[in-house]
Image: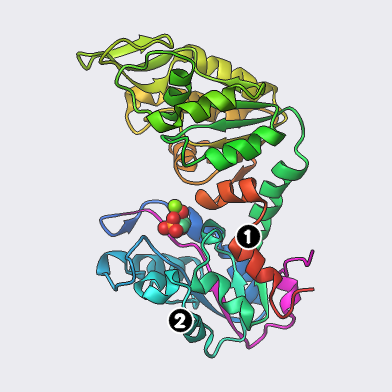
Amino acid sequence: MTSIPVLEDLGDVAGRRVLVRTDFNVPLHDGEITDDFRIRAALPTITWLTERGAQVVCASHLGRPKGEANPKYSMDPVRARLAELAPGVELLENLRFDPGEERNDPAFAAKLVKGVDAYVDDAFGAAHRAHASIVGPPKTLPSAMGRLMQREVEVLLSLRDDPKHPFVAVLGGAKISDKLGVVEALLEVVDALVIGGAMCFTFLAAQGNPIGDSLFEPDQVDTCRRLLGLGKTIHLPEDIVGVDANGDYATFGTRLPDGAKGFDIGPGSAAAFSDVIMEARTVFWNGPMGMFEDERFAAGTRTVAQAMADTKAFTVVGGGDSAAALAQFGLDDDVDHVSTGGGASLELLELGDLPGLAALREAPNAH
Ligand code: 3PG
Ligand code: MG
């Protein structure tokens, strides 16, 4: 297989105009950036280029403005932060203001590469999207993946290809349907799967437990029953924290009474999950164990996050909510790799490739 070109494969970049696709899709609150992790993560690539005399032009999407200019999704706050972190670097307006971006319109890609000498893709979080700015430029320009993309790919593919065992995957979040592909792929390589978050109720229901009014996916019960029947080690919660029919805080076993709602794994489950993480040599974690935004239901996620920080295992956290939880608990520096990609990290684990990577492999300078 052709390999993916890296920055060194661009040759001399001095005086050349380099388009860098970044994922600056950062969380905003009242127009202020609440977490600049994705901007800081692109700095090694940007600095590498500017130090060698390249003229860097960054381009990103922000939110989902659906092909129309919308001041709510303007790049201005990102541009201001980027100017502080990397002075002199240009940033184009939100790529998704143009309907050609998501439609992968060649005319929009042509507009992006006009006057540009080389292309770098460092937008790992968006590499699962076959959008114009991601798959278009490598068709004509010498291209490379940036340092962030390189590290993400190396770490995530190492989990697929040669993880140290025991390898444990800890999955949470609301929906099993969103993660089914990756669950099946992970079951091929992990020694144990740990399930928390609202998706555990679909598994508990599949085992015949009453789950009260907890969130679950009735159309996935059969799927969960099939996964449980594969003979693999799947750890489910043994206790649940939530509210009873009166809306009062309560702790339950795995059988929830009528009207009760589960919002977090219980203390027994959190301790058991933590033991599994402590004994592993590789751990991948994606998705919170409960509704951690509410302090009453944060304990399960906090315990898992703490175990991720404490274990000697090689620890990788998928982007999105689990990365946010880790940061909220101040533990983000205590794991080996926090991915900048949510959907992208899961898709790379599932399929071993992404549209953005495939496009780079076809670049004129790839060998
Ligand atoms: C993300 O935040 O997941 C990436 O930036 C991709 O954004 P999207 O899910 O809107 O395509
Ligand atoms: Mg997303």
Q: Secondary structure at mark 2?
A: helix
Disc on res. 281: none
Of label 2 and label 1, which has the lower sequence position?
A: 2
- Residue 7 forms part of the magenta stretch: yes
Q: Is residue 40 above or below residue 273?
A: below
Q: Quadrant of residue 33?
A: bottom left
Which class describes the residues within 10 Å of circle 1: few (<14), some (14-19), or many (20+)? many
Magenta stretch in the rendered image: 1-28
Label 2 belongs to which residue? 108
In the rendered structure, which amino acid carries the disc numbered 2?
Phe
- Residue 73 forms part of the magenta stretch: no
User: Which quarter of the figure is the N terminus placed in?
Assistant: bottom right
Q: Is residue 1 visible to us here?
A: yes
Q: Which residue is depicted at the point 67% across and 85% down?
A: 14
Relative horizontal placement of residue 280, taking residue 239 as reference (left or right)? right
Q: Residue furthest bottom?
A: 115
Provide residue 281's location: percent of width, then percent of height. 73, 30
As measured in the structure, the alpha-carbon distance from the residue carrying label 2 to the one carrying label 1 is 23 Å
Label 1 belongs to which residue? 149
Q: Which residue is depicted at the point 53% across and 23% down?
A: 225
Q: Main secondary structure of the magenta part?
A: loop
Q: Nearer the viewer, residue 235 or 163?
A: 235
Q: Is residue 217 visible to us here?
A: no
Provide residue 19's location: percent of width, then percent of height. 55, 78
Q: Which residue is depicted at the point 64% across and 25% down?
A: 230
Q: Residue furthest left?
A: 246
Q: Quadrant of residue 285?
A: top right
Q: Which residue is depicted at the point 47% across and 84% down?
A: 107
